[in-house]
Image (tube, coloured by chain):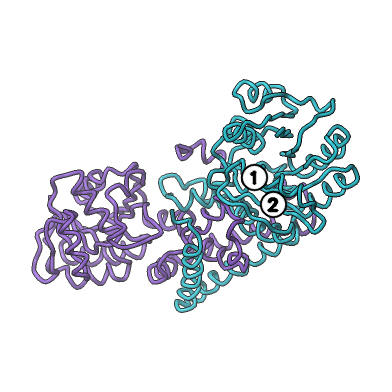
Chain colours: A cyan, B purple
């Protein structure tokens, strides 16, 4: 199997390293940085550099850039990719990407299957990529009604070769609704949280909960502006819900209503305890 | 040195175990649960049980219960404690506790020094106590103008014997202002966050950021209702600030204003990056 990785950042670099670790697949890499390509070749993350200027016979092409860049790359390079091959991506929003990439592939005799590995770090770039990034992660694939079954099976084989902890298969809309909650909202929270003036004086006054809530405030604004904007309605719904629930705490405290405050803390505790019972995340 | 630990829960139990690990101090324990006392004796966390009914010659008494329970215990047992000895506590709010316990000690010839170890787990009880809980933690002491210097030095010696990573000395009001941000607000966020209906479907769609933000939603509502209510104004100020900053994200997304959204993500990133530069928490 020949896989082409487009963009050797944190995710693309980790995919390349993991495929090389787990299989004898041939991995080609494309990146705008010559230094990154040199590093990737040197450490064995890729077998070969693809210039993006000649035809490539990859069976699977993995777009590892942010949504607009991934779509534009596919549009401008589709003629160089092998007819009948499978294209997938790693973007954090799926409806917009699947619609656009699906159309480009359809019109050119290739197959698109949307994907999203649920793994990351608060630091980006090939230098932070890691052959163990996906060990405990879910990988989400988002086929649609028109997705070719053979193409889906090839995408599945690729995910299985990464040896992620779990493969989740869902439709793009469900993906975007749940990711708005599990991933995008925590990134909004982190950035809003650290803007408190108290953050400047917090040294010597903090423990795990400060660190956990603020961790992902370091994300890149170019990528996340696009992810948030391309999932506008789902994310707005989550932010509004959060503000409503925060306001319940706020009003109970302001009113000195201990019963109401205790009740809202208790409800949160029960939801989280049930969540832990239904998953293996306590480990 | 003889230390009496009042309440052998997560924090009291961990203090007892840590003192026994690090020193030859004699540790007495009081708890309302006979089973906990038996467990603590058996594993060597305490040398002796204090019934709370006879006089005790401890040099330091550490109140390890929630604020009202700690104050009421001190009020009802002060006659059994040694004149001139030092009393401290571990409560997450300091103005209210220091005012009340300080008065009781003053009137009875003992010395009070407020304390707060910045360590915890999302699970409570002696069974979760740990002789390594304080290894990487700050321990905050909150003397006031009238605090006796010798008494403060005894409290300091006790903290040093725990071998925490850092001793922070501040006034009760500064403590309460900063803890509202570093600890209480993340607990409010966690409980509000998990109330999204999406939380019920999140299995297979989540990664580290979900786990981090929701982790402390499991806290006990009796303790935290009291901690929030006894730090009402400081916490309200933080919740209101957070809602304001969340609303900035909300409005930028709703307006489709990419520049404003990018700007607010960028500002959060810069604050967090500076915070990491100023501390050693990247390790």
Residue B54 in view in this figure = yes
Q: Quadrant of residue A159?
A: top right
Residue closer to the observer: B102 or B23:
B23
Q: Quadrant of residue B226?
A: bottom left
Residue B263 in view in this figure = no
Q: How many marks?
A: 2
Name the quadrant of the C terminus of chain B. Answer: top left
Q: Position of residue B99 (x, y in %)?
A: 31, 64
Residue A141 badge: 2
Chain at tag 1: A
Left or right relative to B201: residue A101: right
Mark 2 touching mark 1, by CB under 8 A? yes
Q: Position of residue B164 (x, y in %)?
A: 31, 44
Residue closer to the observer: B108 or A50:
A50
Q: Position of residue B229 (x, y in %)?
A: 43, 70
Q: Specify few, some or many for label 2: CA neighbours under 10 Å numbering under 14, 14-19, or 20 or more.
A: many
Q: Specify few, some or many for label 1: CA neighbours under 10 Å numbering under 14, 14-19, or 20 or more.
A: many
Left or right relative to B113: residue A77: right
Residue closer to the observer: B148 or A113:
A113
Residue under label 1: A159
Left or right relative to A240: residue A61: right
């Amino acid at each position: 199997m020949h896989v082409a990785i487009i963009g050797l950042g944190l995710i693309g670099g980790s995919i390349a390293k993991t495929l090389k670790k787990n299989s004898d697949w041939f991995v080609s890499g494309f990146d705008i940085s010559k230094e990154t390509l040199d590093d990737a070749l040197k450490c064995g993350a890729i077998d070969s550099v693809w210039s993006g200027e000649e035809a490539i016979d990859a069976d699977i092409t993995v777009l590892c850039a942010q949504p607009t860049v991934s779509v534009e790359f596919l549009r401008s390079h589709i003629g160089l990719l092998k007819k009948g091959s499978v294209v997938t991506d790693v973007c954090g929003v799926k409806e917009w990407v699947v619609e656009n990439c699906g159309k480009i592939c359809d019109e050119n005799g290739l197959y698109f299957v949307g994907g999203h590995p649920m793994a990351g770090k608060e630091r980006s770039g090939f230098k932070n990529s890691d052959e163990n990034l996906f060990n405990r992660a879910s990988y989400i694939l988002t086929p649609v009604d028109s997705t070719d079954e053979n193409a889906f099976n090839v995408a599945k084989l690729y995910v299985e070769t990464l040896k992620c902890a779990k493969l989740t298969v869902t439709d793009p809309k469900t993906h975007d609704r749940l990711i708005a909650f599990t991933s995008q909202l925590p990134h909004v929270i982190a950035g809003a949280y650290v803007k408190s003036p108290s953050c400047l004086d917090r040294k010597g006054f903090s423990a795990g909960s400060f660190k956990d809530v603020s961790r992902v405030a370091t994300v890149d604004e170019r990528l996340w502006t696009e992810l948030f904007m391309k999932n506008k309605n789902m994310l707005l719904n989550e932010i509004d819900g959060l503000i409503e629930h925060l306001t319940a705490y706020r009003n109970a405290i302001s009113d000195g209503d201990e019963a109401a405050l205790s009740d809202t803390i208790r409800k949160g505790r029960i939801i989280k305890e049930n969540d832990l019972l239904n998953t293996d995340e306590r480990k």
